[in-house]
Protein backbone atom coordinates (compact mmCIF):
# COMPACT_ATOMS: atom_id res chain seq x y z
CA UNK A 1 0.00 0.00 0.00
CA UNK A 2 1.24 3.45 -0.84
CA UNK A 3 1.79 5.39 2.37
CA UNK A 4 -0.26 8.63 2.72
CA UNK A 5 1.77 11.83 2.78
CA UNK A 6 2.02 13.53 6.12
CA UNK A 7 -1.17 15.43 7.16
CA UNK A 8 0.44 18.86 7.04
CA UNK A 9 1.22 18.29 3.39
CA UNK A 10 -2.38 17.35 2.63
CA UNK A 11 -3.70 20.49 4.39
CA UNK A 12 -1.25 22.77 2.62
CA UNK A 13 -2.18 21.22 -0.72
CA UNK A 14 -5.92 21.71 -0.18
CA UNK A 15 -5.40 25.31 1.03
CA UNK A 16 -3.18 26.12 -1.94
CA UNK A 17 -5.85 24.68 -4.26
CA UNK A 18 -8.56 26.87 -2.68
CA UNK A 19 -6.32 29.96 -2.80
CA UNK A 20 -5.85 29.46 -6.53
CA UNK A 21 -9.61 29.93 -7.08
CA UNK A 22 -9.60 33.38 -5.46
CA UNK A 23 -7.93 35.50 -8.24
CA UNK A 24 -10.21 34.22 -11.06
CA UNK A 25 -13.23 34.68 -8.78
CA UNK A 26 -12.25 38.32 -8.14
CA UNK A 27 -11.71 38.94 -11.86
CA UNK A 28 -15.06 37.35 -12.72
CA UNK A 29 -16.84 39.48 -10.14
CA UNK A 30 -15.23 42.73 -11.27
CA UNK A 31 -16.10 41.99 -14.88
CA UNK A 32 -19.70 41.16 -14.06
CA UNK A 33 -20.36 44.19 -11.82
CA UNK A 34 -21.25 47.43 -13.62
CA UNK A 35 -19.05 50.32 -12.56
CA UNK A 36 -19.73 53.91 -13.54
CA UNK A 37 -16.01 54.66 -13.49
CA UNK A 38 -14.00 53.39 -16.40
CA UNK A 39 -11.36 50.86 -15.47
CA UNK A 40 -7.69 51.64 -15.89
CA UNK A 41 -7.31 53.72 -19.04
CA UNK A 42 -4.27 52.79 -21.05
CA UNK A 43 -5.26 54.35 -24.38
CA UNK A 44 -7.18 57.59 -24.04
CA UNK A 45 -8.34 57.73 -27.65
CA UNK A 46 -10.88 60.56 -27.71
CA UNK A 47 -12.74 59.48 -24.60
CA UNK A 48 -11.98 62.60 -22.62
CA UNK A 49 -12.67 65.43 -25.03
CA UNK A 50 -14.11 68.50 -23.40
CA UNK A 51 -17.69 68.83 -24.65
CA UNK A 52 -21.16 69.84 -23.55
CA UNK A 53 -23.71 67.10 -23.15
CA UNK A 54 -27.42 67.83 -23.69
CA UNK A 55 -29.02 69.91 -20.95
CA UNK A 56 -25.68 70.82 -19.39
CA UNK A 57 -24.97 74.35 -18.24
CA UNK A 58 -22.66 76.45 -20.37
CA UNK A 59 -21.49 79.51 -18.45
CA UNK A 60 -20.24 81.10 -21.67
CA UNK A 61 -23.78 82.24 -22.56
CA UNK A 62 -25.90 84.62 -20.52
CA UNK A 63 -28.82 82.20 -20.39
CA UNK A 64 -26.50 79.34 -19.41
CA UNK A 65 -27.89 76.97 -22.05
CA UNK A 66 -25.43 74.70 -23.82
CA UNK A 67 -28.05 73.87 -26.48
CA UNK A 68 -28.34 77.09 -28.44
CA UNK A 69 -31.73 78.15 -29.79
CA UNK A 70 -32.04 78.50 -33.59
CA UNK A 71 -30.93 81.77 -35.07
CA UNK A 72 -33.95 83.92 -35.92
CA UNK A 73 -35.01 83.37 -39.54
CA UNK A 74 -33.58 79.83 -39.79
CA UNK A 75 -35.49 77.77 -42.36
CA UNK A 76 -35.40 73.97 -42.42
CA UNK A 77 -34.69 72.47 -45.83
CA UNK A 78 -38.17 71.04 -46.36
CA UNK A 79 -39.79 74.33 -45.38
CA UNK A 80 -38.45 76.12 -48.42
CA UNK A 81 -40.88 74.15 -50.61
CA UNK A 82 -43.86 76.27 -49.67
CA UNK A 83 -45.24 76.62 -53.18
CA UNK A 84 -47.44 73.51 -53.55
CA UNK A 85 -48.02 74.14 -57.26
CA UNK A 86 -44.31 74.40 -58.07
CA UNK A 87 -43.03 71.68 -55.74
CA UNK A 88 -45.85 69.14 -55.52
CA UNK A 89 -47.90 69.82 -58.62
CA UNK A 90 -50.94 70.55 -56.46
CA UNK A 91 -53.35 73.53 -56.62
CA UNK A 92 -56.16 73.81 -54.04
CA UNK A 93 -55.77 70.14 -53.12
CA UNK A 94 -56.11 68.98 -56.75
CA UNK A 95 -53.51 68.02 -59.35
CA UNK A 96 -52.49 71.12 -61.25
CA UNK A 97 -53.50 71.32 -64.88
CA UNK A 98 -51.24 74.27 -65.69
CA UNK A 99 -47.57 75.08 -65.37
CA UNK A 100 -46.60 76.92 -62.17
CA UNK A 101 -45.96 80.66 -62.29
CA UNK A 102 -42.63 81.49 -63.84
CA UNK A 103 -42.64 78.61 -66.34
CA UNK A 104 -43.86 79.28 -69.88
CA UNK A 105 -45.09 76.72 -72.36
CA UNK A 106 -43.12 77.06 -75.57
CA UNK A 107 -41.54 74.98 -78.29
CA UNK A 108 -38.21 75.42 -76.56
CA UNK A 109 -39.63 74.24 -73.22
CA UNK A 110 -41.09 71.12 -74.85
CA UNK A 111 -37.83 70.45 -76.70
CA UNK A 112 -36.01 70.60 -73.36
CA UNK A 113 -38.61 68.21 -71.93
CA UNK A 114 -38.09 65.84 -74.85
CA UNK A 115 -34.34 65.88 -74.40
CA UNK A 116 -34.60 65.19 -70.65
CA UNK A 117 -37.29 62.54 -71.20
CA UNK A 118 -35.06 60.78 -73.72
CA UNK A 119 -32.22 60.76 -71.23
CA UNK A 120 -34.05 59.78 -68.06
CA UNK A 121 -37.34 58.13 -68.90
CA UNK A 122 -37.01 56.54 -72.34
CA UNK A 123 -34.71 53.80 -71.04
CA UNK A 124 -37.74 52.18 -69.47
CA UNK A 125 -40.75 53.85 -71.06
CA UNK A 126 -39.37 53.92 -74.63
CA UNK A 127 -38.89 56.97 -76.85
CA UNK A 128 -42.54 56.99 -77.85
CA UNK A 129 -43.75 56.10 -74.35
CA UNK A 130 -45.13 52.62 -74.94
CA UNK A 131 -43.22 51.10 -72.02
CA UNK A 132 -40.83 49.33 -74.38
CA UNK A 133 -37.48 50.96 -73.50
CA UNK A 134 -34.13 49.21 -73.69
CA UNK A 135 -34.04 48.37 -69.97
CA UNK A 136 -37.46 46.85 -70.27
CA UNK A 137 -36.53 44.80 -73.33
CA UNK A 138 -33.40 43.50 -71.63
CA UNK A 139 -35.28 42.62 -68.45
CA UNK A 140 -37.94 40.74 -70.40
CA UNK A 141 -35.19 38.87 -72.24
CA UNK A 142 -33.47 37.91 -68.98
CA UNK A 143 -36.71 36.90 -67.33
CA UNK A 144 -37.47 34.43 -70.08
CA UNK A 145 -33.92 33.09 -70.54
CA UNK A 146 -32.18 30.40 -68.52
CA UNK A 147 -29.98 33.14 -66.95
CA UNK A 148 -33.08 34.66 -65.43
CA UNK A 149 -33.75 34.70 -61.70
CA UNK A 150 -34.79 31.31 -60.42
CA UNK A 151 -36.33 32.67 -57.23
CA UNK A 152 -39.57 33.86 -58.74
CA UNK A 153 -38.48 37.53 -58.93
CA UNK A 154 -40.98 39.43 -61.03
CA UNK A 155 -40.23 42.28 -63.42
CA UNK A 156 -42.73 45.10 -63.29
CA UNK A 157 -42.92 46.44 -66.81
CA UNK A 158 -42.66 50.20 -67.22
CA UNK A 159 -46.18 51.40 -67.87
CA UNK A 160 -47.23 52.60 -71.28
CA UNK A 161 -47.79 56.34 -71.07
CA UNK A 162 -50.62 55.82 -73.58
CA UNK A 163 -52.50 53.62 -71.14
CA UNK A 164 -56.04 55.11 -70.92
CA UNK A 165 -55.59 55.74 -67.18
CA UNK A 166 -52.22 57.43 -67.59
CA UNK A 167 -53.63 59.61 -70.37
CA UNK A 168 -56.07 61.03 -67.83
CA UNK A 169 -53.20 62.18 -65.59
CA UNK A 170 -53.03 65.91 -65.04
CA UNK A 171 -49.82 67.81 -65.68
CA UNK A 172 -49.25 68.18 -61.92
CA UNK A 173 -49.59 64.43 -61.35
CA UNK A 174 -47.12 63.66 -64.14
CA UNK A 175 -44.72 66.15 -62.57
CA UNK A 176 -45.23 64.49 -59.18
CA UNK A 177 -44.58 61.01 -60.60
CA UNK A 178 -41.34 62.24 -62.24
CA UNK A 179 -40.37 63.76 -58.87
CA UNK A 180 -41.42 61.13 -56.33
CA UNK A 181 -41.99 58.02 -58.43
CA UNK A 182 -45.04 55.82 -58.09
CA UNK A 183 -45.43 52.29 -56.70
CA UNK A 184 -42.51 50.32 -58.28
CA UNK A 185 -41.04 53.31 -60.11
CA UNK A 186 -38.43 55.35 -58.25
CA UNK A 187 -38.54 59.16 -58.19
CA UNK A 188 -36.15 61.40 -60.10
CA UNK A 189 -36.47 64.46 -57.87
CA UNK A 190 -32.85 64.29 -56.80
CA UNK A 191 -31.46 63.73 -60.30
CA UNK A 192 -33.51 66.01 -62.52
CA UNK A 193 -33.85 69.75 -61.92
CA UNK A 194 -37.21 71.10 -60.83
CA UNK A 195 -37.89 73.02 -64.06
CA UNK A 196 -36.81 70.06 -66.14
CA UNK A 197 -39.28 67.82 -64.34
CA UNK A 198 -42.06 70.20 -65.37
CA UNK A 199 -40.69 70.21 -68.91
CA UNK A 200 -40.74 66.39 -68.91
CA UNK A 201 -44.33 66.34 -67.62
CA UNK A 202 -45.34 68.72 -70.42
CA UNK A 203 -43.51 66.59 -72.97
CA UNK A 204 -45.26 63.42 -71.72
CA UNK A 205 -48.58 65.13 -72.47
CA UNK A 206 -47.27 66.06 -75.92
CA UNK A 207 -46.31 62.41 -76.46
CA UNK A 208 -49.77 61.31 -75.39
CA UNK A 209 -51.38 63.78 -77.77
CA UNK A 210 -49.10 62.61 -80.57
CA UNK A 211 -50.64 59.12 -80.38
CA UNK A 212 -54.22 60.26 -79.96
CA UNK A 213 -54.54 63.36 -82.09
CA UNK A 214 -57.51 64.00 -84.36
CA UNK A 215 -57.82 66.09 -87.48
CA UNK A 216 -59.15 68.91 -85.30
CA UNK A 217 -55.74 69.15 -83.60
CA UNK A 218 -54.09 70.05 -86.91
CA UNK A 219 -54.24 73.74 -87.91
CA UNK A 220 -56.65 74.04 -90.89
CA UNK A 221 -53.99 75.43 -93.23
CA UNK A 222 -51.80 72.35 -92.64
CA UNK A 223 -54.48 69.68 -93.00
CA UNK A 224 -53.99 69.48 -96.74
CA UNK A 225 -50.41 68.32 -96.10
CA UNK A 226 -51.55 65.19 -94.31
CA UNK A 227 -51.64 61.98 -96.24
CA UNK A 228 -55.20 60.71 -96.44
CA UNK A 229 -54.67 57.15 -95.24
CA UNK A 230 -52.87 58.30 -92.09
CA UNK A 231 -55.72 60.50 -90.84
CA UNK A 232 -57.70 58.85 -88.09
C1 LIG B 1 -36.13 52.21 -64.30
C2 LIG B 1 -37.30 52.23 -65.14
C3 LIG B 1 -38.12 53.51 -65.17
C4 LIG B 1 -37.70 54.78 -65.48
C5 LIG B 1 -36.29 55.24 -65.81
C6 LIG B 1 -38.87 55.61 -65.44
N1 LIG B 1 -39.97 54.87 -65.13
FE1 LIG B 1 -41.90 55.53 -65.07
N2 LIG B 1 -42.52 53.68 -64.55
C7 LIG B 1 -41.71 52.57 -64.40
C8 LIG B 1 -42.49 51.46 -63.93
C9 LIG B 1 -41.96 50.07 -63.61
C10 LIG B 1 -43.82 51.92 -63.81
C11 LIG B 1 -45.03 51.14 -63.30
C12 LIG B 1 -44.97 51.17 -61.81
C13 LIG B 1 -45.99 50.28 -61.17
O1 LIG B 1 -47.06 50.09 -61.74
O2 LIG B 1 -45.69 49.80 -60.06
C14 LIG B 1 -43.81 53.32 -64.22
C15 LIG B 1 -44.93 54.12 -64.30
C16 LIG B 1 -44.94 55.42 -64.76
C17 LIG B 1 -46.14 56.21 -65.00
C18 LIG B 1 -47.56 55.72 -64.81
C19 LIG B 1 -48.03 55.90 -63.41
C20 LIG B 1 -49.44 55.40 -63.18
O3 LIG B 1 -50.26 56.21 -62.76
O4 LIG B 1 -49.68 54.22 -63.40
C21 LIG B 1 -45.72 57.43 -65.44
C22 LIG B 1 -46.60 58.61 -65.82
C23 LIG B 1 -44.27 57.40 -65.48
N3 LIG B 1 -43.84 56.17 -65.08
C24 LIG B 1 -43.49 58.47 -65.87
C25 LIG B 1 -42.09 58.45 -65.90
C26 LIG B 1 -41.27 59.60 -66.19
C27 LIG B 1 -41.80 60.99 -66.53
C28 LIG B 1 -39.97 59.18 -66.12
C29 LIG B 1 -38.71 60.00 -66.31
C30 LIG B 1 -38.53 61.05 -65.37
C31 LIG B 1 -39.98 57.76 -65.79
N4 LIG B 1 -41.29 57.36 -65.65
C32 LIG B 1 -38.85 56.98 -65.67
C33 LIG B 1 -40.36 52.51 -64.65
C34 LIG B 1 -39.55 53.58 -64.96
Image (cartoon, rainbow, N blue to C red):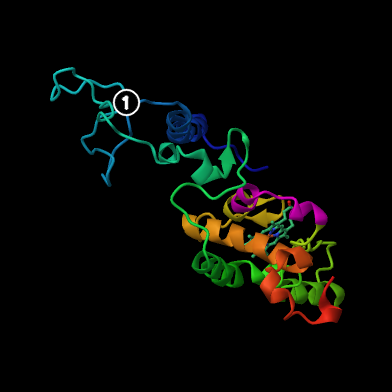
Q: Which residue is drawn at 60% across and 57% down?
A: 201
Q: Is residue 212 left or right of residue 72?
A: right
**Location of residue 68 by image quarter:** top left
Ligand 1 appears in which quadrant? bottom right
Segment colored magenta: 164-175
**Location of residue 164 by image quarter:** bottom right
The quadrant of the rendering that contains the C terminus is bottom right
Residue furthest to the front in view is: 221
Q: Does residue 126 appear anywhere in the picture?
A: no
Q: Does residue 218 appear anywhere in the picture?
A: yes
Q: Where is residue 15 in the image (x, y as percent from the top left)?
A: 47, 30
The quadrant of the rendering that contains the N terminus is top right
The secondary element bearing badge 1 is classed as loop
Q: In this view, does 219 lie to the left or right of 29?
A: right
Q: Which residue is drawn at 45% across and 41% down?
A: 81
Mark 1 packing: few (<14 Cα in 10 Å), some, or many (20+)?
few
Q: Is residue 136 above or below residue 31?
A: below
The residue pinned by badge 1 equals 54
Q: Residue at x 52, y 39 (%)?
A: 84
Q: In this view, does 147 lie above or below 90?
A: below
Q: Is residue 115 left or right of residue 24?
A: right
Q: In this view, does 166 lie above or below 7?
A: below
Q: Which of 107 and 190 is in front in this view?
A: 107
Amino acid sequence: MIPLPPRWMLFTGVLAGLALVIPPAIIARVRATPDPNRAVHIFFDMDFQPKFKPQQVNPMFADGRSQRPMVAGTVAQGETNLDAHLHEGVVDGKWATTLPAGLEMSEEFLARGQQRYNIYCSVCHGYAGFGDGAVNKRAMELMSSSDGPADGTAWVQAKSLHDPLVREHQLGLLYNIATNGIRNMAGYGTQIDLEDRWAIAAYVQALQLSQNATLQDVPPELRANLKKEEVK
